[in-house]
Image (cartoon, helix red, strand yellow):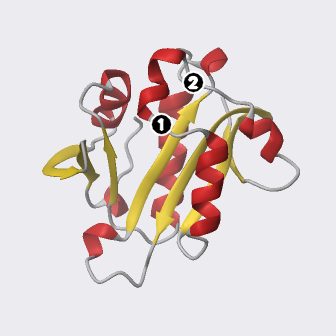
């Protein structure tokens, strides 16, 4: 299973906009089209990517890299991660998260933050398995998680 993160472009965006999570997961994540709009509104920090496995698009992710932000704990965020419902339950989410962590590490991040609802049990399990831990903070109605010191991470998720 070879996971790649490819920048979202005019060439692949329509296909990406067609990706959907399962109906019971829609409450947890914005559509990819809405995420693209958010990326354009935050062009200085947003980094949207299509997730490919062995050359086939299977999902979408978006990061926030704000290296000028004063608080080093708030510089690097995993804003979005979704796997299309037809590819779920096959290990793509875990494999994509491993690639995402590698990307952050290669681009100088010390830690990664994200937020999700505490009822999003599948995502929480994947994040916790990767080493993310609750910070005790809330982001609106979502719990915040952080993966610390990713520079030293060499394990397989």
Give the side of residue 16 with respect to residue 39, left or right: right
Relative height, residue 136 to residue 110 (above, below): above
Give the side of residue 116 with respect to residue 79, left or right: left
Mark 1 surroundings within 10 Å by alpha-carbon count, few (fewer than 14), some (14 through 19), many (20 or more) = some
Kindly identify the residue that appears in the image at 43 percent across and 79 percent down.
67
Relative height, residue 102 to residue 22 (above, below): below
The x, y position of residue 68, in whole percent, is: 41, 85
- The residue that mark 1 highlights is 29
The x, y position of residue 27, in whole percent, is: 43, 28
- The residue that mark 2 highlights is 21
Which picture quadrant has residue 86?
top right
Which corner quadrant holds the C terminus? Answer: top left
Kindly identify the residue that appears in the image at 61 percent across and 47 percent down.
34
Q: SS for tag 2?
A: loop
The x, y position of residue 71, in whole percent, is: 25, 77
Q: 98 and 137: which one is in front? A: 137
Distance of label 2 from label 1 (alpha carbons): 9 Å
Pointers 2 and 1 in contact (CB under 8 A)?
Answer: yes
The x, y position of residue 117, in whole percent, is: 29, 35
């Amino acid at each position: 299973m070879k996971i790649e993160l490819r920048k979202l472009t005019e060439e692949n965006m329509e296909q990406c906009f067609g990706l959907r999570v399962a109906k019971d997961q829609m409450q947890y994540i914005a559509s990819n089209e809405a995420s693209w709009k958010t990326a354009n509104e935050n062009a200085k920090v947003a980094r949207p990517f299509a997730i490919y496995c062995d050359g086939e698009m299977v999902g979408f992710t978006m990061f926030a890299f704000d290296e000028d932000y004063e608080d080093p704990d708030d510089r690097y965020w995993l804003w979005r991660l979704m796997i299309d419902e037809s590819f779920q339950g096959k290990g793509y989410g875990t494999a994509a998260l491993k690639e995402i962590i590698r990307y952050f590490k290669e681009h100088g991040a010390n830690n990664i933050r994200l937020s999700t609802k505490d009822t999003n049990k599948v995502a929480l399990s994947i994040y916790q398995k990767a080493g993310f831990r609750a910070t005790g903070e809330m982001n609106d109605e979502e719990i915040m998680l952080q993966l610390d010191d990713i520079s030293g991470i060499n394990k397989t998720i």
